[in-house]
Image (cartoon, helix red, strand yellow):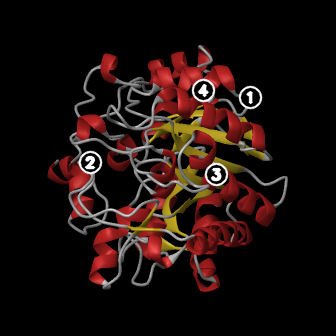
Amino acid sequence: MGILFTPFTIGGLTTKNRFVRSATYDGGADPGGFVSEWQMDLYAALARGEVGLIVSGIFNVDSPGKISPSQNSIHRDHFMEGLARLTDAVHQHGSKIAVQLFHGGREAFRRQEALGQPALGPSDLEPGQDPYFKGGAKAMTDEEIEAVIEAFGKAAARARKAGADAVQIHGAHAYLLAQFLSPQGNQRRDKWGGPLANRLRLHKRIYESVRTAVGSNYPVMIKLGVADGFVGGLELEEGLQAAVELADMGCDAIEVSQGLRGRDDTQAEFRPKIVKREREAYFREWCRQVKARVKAPVIMVGGLRTRDLMEEVLSSGHADLVALCRPLIREPDLVASWCAGKERRATCVSCNGCFDLILTGARLACVLAEKD
C-alpha cells in the first residue's frame, strides 16, 4: 500500500502509519477550558478514520497565554480528568495522541484586553506599531518568562499522567515562541533578545523544563516556525539553525511550519486555494533542508491533498511523516478511505472558511460541507 501506511517510531512511540493530524484549534472546549463531549466525538472520529497520530488542538499552559474562552487548558490538575477521557477515546480506536502545549503571547491581546490586562510578549508594543499585528503587548519580565517555562513543564507532566502518548511544544504560527524567535517580534536587548542564541533561549529552556518533567523516554516534539511569512522577519537560515540545535538537544520530532504571519492568508501557514497538485506541499523545500540537517524525524505539513504526492515526499526523504489539518476538518475519514484503496484527492479546496468561522467564536467545521 505504500510507505504512508507503514508504522513509524518517534522516541518510544510507534504509530500505525505515517499520517499525523496536525494540531487544529477547534473552539469546542466547555466553559473554563475543559474537554467537551463534542470534542470527544471529534477525536474519536479522527481515530476511527485511521489517523496514526492525532495532535490535539492548543492546550494553554498558563492563563495569560489563553486566546479564547473556548480553548482547552492544562494549567491546573483538574483539567486532567477530561483529558484522560479524551486519550482513552483515541486509544480505543487504535490511534495515538499528542497534546500540543501552547502559550499565545501577544496573540492573546483580545482576551487579555477584555479582562483589563495587557497581553504578554517579548517586547513592548503599542497597537498599530507592528504592521503585521493589530494589538499591543507588554514586554515580559524575567520572572514572567521563568513562570512560563515552569508552566510548560508542569503541563507536560499532566499530559503524560492523563495518558497522552507524547507532547508537542507549539513554536510556530505567530504565538509566543515564534514571537521570541523572530527579530521582527523580539526587540529585546537582554539575554532573551538580539542574536539567534538569545532569541532561541526560550525554546531551549522550555524543552529542558518539559524533558525534566516527563523523563528521557517520553516523546517531546516541537512545531517550529523556521521562517516568517514576510521579508524582514525570521529568515530560513536562522530557522534551520534553530531546528538543528533543538534536534541536538533531543527533540524527538520537528513539524516544520511558519513563524509570524504576514498581511494576509498568502503569507500565513494556512495558504488558500490549494486546488492543484503544484500548489500542494508549500513547505516542502523547508522540510527538505531541515531533514538534510537533523537526525530527528521531520513532519511535513502545508497544503497536502494528494496521496501520491505524499508518497513521493516520504520516498524522496524530504520528511518522515505527513500532517493534515484542513482536509480532516471536512473529511475525518479521509485516511481510512485511502487505506481502503481509494485514490481520490482530498476534497478540501482551502477556502479558509473554517478559519473564518473559528474567528466568530463558533466551533470548528467545514463551511462547504455544511452546505453539501
Q: Nearer the viewer, mark 3 or mark 1?
A: 3
Q: What residue sits right under mark 1 in the picture?
A: 295
Query: Between disc 2 and disc 1, whose residue precedes?
Result: 2
Residue 139 in the image: state x and y as whole percent: 44, 66
Q: Are the residues at dot 2 and dot 4 in contact (C-beta closer than 8 Å)?
A: no
Query: Is the residue marked by circle 3 packed among few (<14), some (14-19), or many (20+) residues within 10 Å?
Result: some
Q: What residue sits right under mark 4 in the picture?
A: 290
Q: Residue at x 35, y 67 (%)?
A: 137
C-alpha separation, residue under disc 3 versus residue under disc 2: 24 Å
Query: Between disc 3 and disc 4, whose residue precedes?
Result: 3
258 with respect to 125 (left or right)? right
Q: Is the N terminus in the top left, top right, bottom left or bottom right quadrant?
A: top right
Residue 138 in the image: state x and y as whole percent: 39, 69
C-alpha separation, residue under disc 2 versus residue under disc 1: 34 Å
Residue 271 in sight: no
Q: What residue sits right under mark 3 in the picture?
A: 201
